[in-house]
């Protein structure tokens, strides 16, 4: 195995995940703009986790975004998870049955059958998430201020079982780092607050026509 081969594998791993993380961050900042109080809570979470004080430049602040600091960003992690619940990067996924099986509701599946499931719809089902399933509420992921993960069979944004996304933790770290830096220095607002964002039907969940924001220095 050559260095070039390893480099190409690593590059493919990173590039393959760019659309999913980029789309999730787009929806994340859209939801923060729709919920200014949550945006401020996330920004406070970043400041407290990094112990940032005074007027730091970007390079100075970046040194504070350590692995330990990222682990302390429970509210930010919850807000990102809540975004993925409502706006999963891959809204529809599918599997093929390796053998005859019976689904939990009694539906029989034959070997070779294709089974599709809608991650987008599952994240909004009241019998899974409660009566406030349509509400953007990061607190549902917190217990006494500490992030609590849900079963991957309930929160299926990264799939579950032996085929769970191997880049899950990497994706969270990427998103938390970028979100932390932006929230430390800017407060965001929608250019048109009367316009609701809609999605474009693709393999991944894109914001149709992009997301236009104002960024105000903090």
Image (cartoon, grey):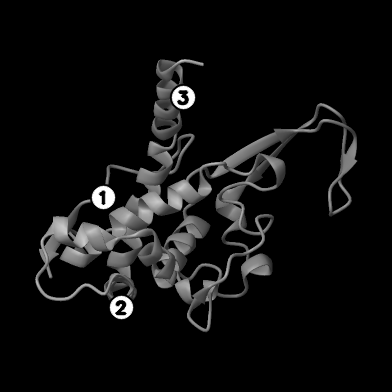
Percent coordinates x, y for residue 44 in the rendering: 29, 76
For label 2, the crowd category at 10 Å Cα-Cα, with few meaning under 14, some 14 to 19 and many 20 or more, is few
From what the image shows, is residue 70 above or below residue 156?
below
| Nearer to me, 61 or 127 | 61
Q: Which residue is drawn at the image coordinates 69% and 68% (left, top)?
A: 127
Tell me: 193 left or right of 151: left
Callout 2: SS: helix
Q: Which residue is drawn at 61% across and 39% down?
A: 93
Across and down, in percent, residue 121 comes to 59, 54
Nearer the observer, 103 or 158: 158
200 over 181 or under it: above or below: above
Q: Distance between the residues labelled 2 and 1?
A: 20 Å
Q: How crowded is mark 3: few (under 14 residues within 10 Å), some or many (20 or more)?
A: few
Q: In this view, does 20 lie above or below 113?
A: below
On screen, 24 above or below 136?
A: above
Asked which secondary structure carries label 1, the reply is loop
Residue 211 shows which numbered tag?
1
Between 78 and 46, which is closer to the camera in this rendering?
A: 46
State the separation of the CA atoms marked 3 and 1.
31 Å
Tell whether 154 sits left or right of 41: right
Does the image show residue 73? yes
Sooner in the amino-acid sequence: mark 2 or mark 1: 2
- Check disc 3 and report the residue beneath it: 9
Pointer 3 and pointer 1: residues touching (CB < 8 Å)? no
Q: Which mark lies nearer to you, 3 or 1?
A: 3
Q: Residue furthest bottom?
A: 144
> Disc 2 marks which residue?
37
Residue located 27% across and 44% down the image: 210
Of the numbered discs 2 and 3, the one sitting upstream in the chain is 3
Q: Distance between the residues labelled 2 and 3?
A: 41 Å
């Amino acid at each position: 195995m050559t260095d070039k081969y390893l480099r190409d594998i690593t590059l493919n791993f990173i590039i393959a995940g760019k659309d999913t993380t980029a789309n999730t961050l787009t929806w994340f900042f859209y939801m923060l703009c729709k919920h200014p109080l949550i945006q401020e809570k996330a920004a406070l979470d970043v400041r407290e986790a990094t112990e940032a004080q005074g007027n730091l430049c970007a390079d100075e602040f970046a040194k504070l975004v350590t692995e330990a600091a990222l682990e302390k960003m429970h509210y930010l992690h919850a807000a990102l998870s809540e975004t993925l619940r409502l706006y999963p990067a891959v809204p529809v996924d599918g599997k093929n049955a390796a053998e005859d099986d019976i689904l939990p509701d009694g539906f029989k599946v034959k070997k070779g059958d294709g089974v599709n499931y809608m991650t987008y719809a599952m994240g909004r089902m009241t019998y899974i998430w409660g009566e406030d399933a349509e509400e953007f509420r990061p607190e549902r992921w917190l217990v006494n201020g500490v992030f609590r993960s849900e079963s991957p069979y309930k929160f299926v944004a990264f799939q579950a079982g032996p085929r769970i996304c191997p880049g899950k933790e990497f994706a969270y770290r990427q998103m938390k780092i970028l979100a932390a830096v932006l929230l430390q220095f800017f407060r965001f607002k929608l250019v048109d607050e009367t316009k609701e964002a809609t999605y474009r039907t693709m393999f991944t969940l894109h914001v149709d026509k992009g997301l236009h924001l104002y960024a105000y220095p903090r």
